[in-house]
Amino acid sequence: MTEEINHDRRRVLGAFFASSAMAIAAAELGIIRSADARSSNDDPAGATLIQLPTQTQRRGKERQMGHTTFYRTTQIDGTSIFYREAGPKDGPTLLLLHGLPSSSRMFEPLFGRLSDRYHLVAPDYPGFGHSDWPDPKEFAYTFDHYAEIMNHFTEVLGLSSYTLYMQDYGGPVGFRMALAHPERVEALIVQDAVAHNEGLGANWKTRRAFWADRAANESALRTNLLSLQTTRIRHIGSDPNVDRYNPDLWTDEFAFLSQAGQAEIQSDLFYDYRTNVDSYPKWQAWMREKQPRLLVLWGKYELSFDPSEPEAYRRDVPNAEVHLVDGGHFALDTAADEMSELVRVFIGVGVAGSRTRAAN
């Protein structure tokens, strides 16, 4: 095993690797034998773990090992789609789908921590970030349309299989993609995205009224959804330690929302959000039938959605991993180290399990 692979993979407890699949996962993650291991041909399950590096050491190594991030555009169905890409293309692929009012920029913390081993691809939806912003009179801002464009995006890039990482709006886009092409989806990672009606909390009263009568509630909806105060609360939620958050996070997003045409684009798209609620039972049935590998990461200070939602996923997928992390709706703001480690182990174990099944 090369020094590059060994560099920062000393993460998981030895007992975790008792089974043969977990032993292969240990090798995949770069766990190193101690000096008393007999030879490089010994059974990996018999290896002992060396001392874990400190968090500071891991961060330094991640920075050293991370691959360059490329900022690219491609034409999809006549629309210019911007995307970020990093990491080895022969590694496991993470397709990262962002939320409102963010863009692929929200995933920069993961790019810096995971691109040493994994192929990361994060597009901006039409109307967001650096992708085209077509006129709503000429372009359907719907989640069905977004999923169609994102599926075509994966085909143009040659992404035949990937783990879907879905945050907020990434949930309804990603679930549509998964149901359309389940053969492409190796696993699901959900970060603060809803697939159950109960997950929409009390602040959705105004939003539900907008769905019932758009004309009468358009002004109230824009204040509720797109204001500076709402944009700020999405980040800090109920976190009492507000000094951990860079205010550029929400001022940059509010500047984006304040640009010409954005209110119309976001209102159109959010009016279509009602179709997500109608689709929840279908997504739940798909999860119950397919039992996908599922990791749920949830900010414990989240205020956009109801706190019951993380465990709701476990009703559909009993083997789902569910973790509350130290953050708000955009938990990567404050919990990127913890979340990247959870993702690294989750994907590594999945790769190891696939190799074990193939060998058998």
Image (cartoon, rainbow, N blue to C red):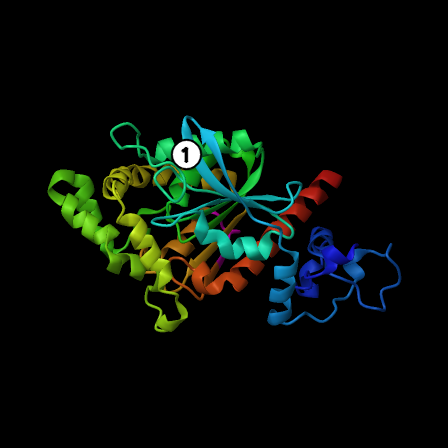
| Residue stretch in magenta | 317-322
Image quarter of residue 247: bottom left
Q: Camera-side residue: 2 or 201?
A: 2
Q: Is residue 45 above or below residue 121?
A: below
Assign the magenta stretch its main secondary structure: loop
If the image is split into quadrants, where does the N terminus sit?
A: bottom right
Q: Is residue 277 above or below residue 244?
A: above
Dot 1: few (<14), some (14–19), or many (≥20) neighbours within 10 Å? many
Q: Camera-side residue: 227 or 331?
A: 227
Residue drawn at x 28%, y 32% as measured from the top left: 135
Which amino acid, mark 1? Answer: Ala
In the displayed structure, does residue 271 sit left or right of residue 220?
right
In reply to whether residue 330 is colored magenta, the answer given is no
From the image, tell me which residue sits under label 1: 147
Q: Is residue 188 above or below residue 81?
A: below
Could one spot residue 138 in this view of the protein? yes
Q: Is residue 245 above or below residue 68?
A: below
Residue drawn at x 84%, y 68% as measured from the top left: 35
> Which element carries disc 1, helix, strand or loop?
helix
Residue 196 drawn at (x, y percent) = 35, 47
If the image is split into quadrants, where does the C terminus sit?
A: top right
Residue 95 drawn at (x, y percent) = 52, 43
In the displayed structure, does residue 289 sit left or right of residue 134?
right
Could one spot residue 321 in this view of the protein? no
Residue drawn at x 41%, y 47% as measured from the top left: 103
Kindly give the residue lying farthest to the left in the view shown.
216
Residue 241 drawn at (x, y percent) = 37, 73
Q: How many marks?
A: 1
In reply to whether residue 321 is colored magenta, the answer given is yes
In the displayed structure, does residue 208 sit left or right of residue 155?
left
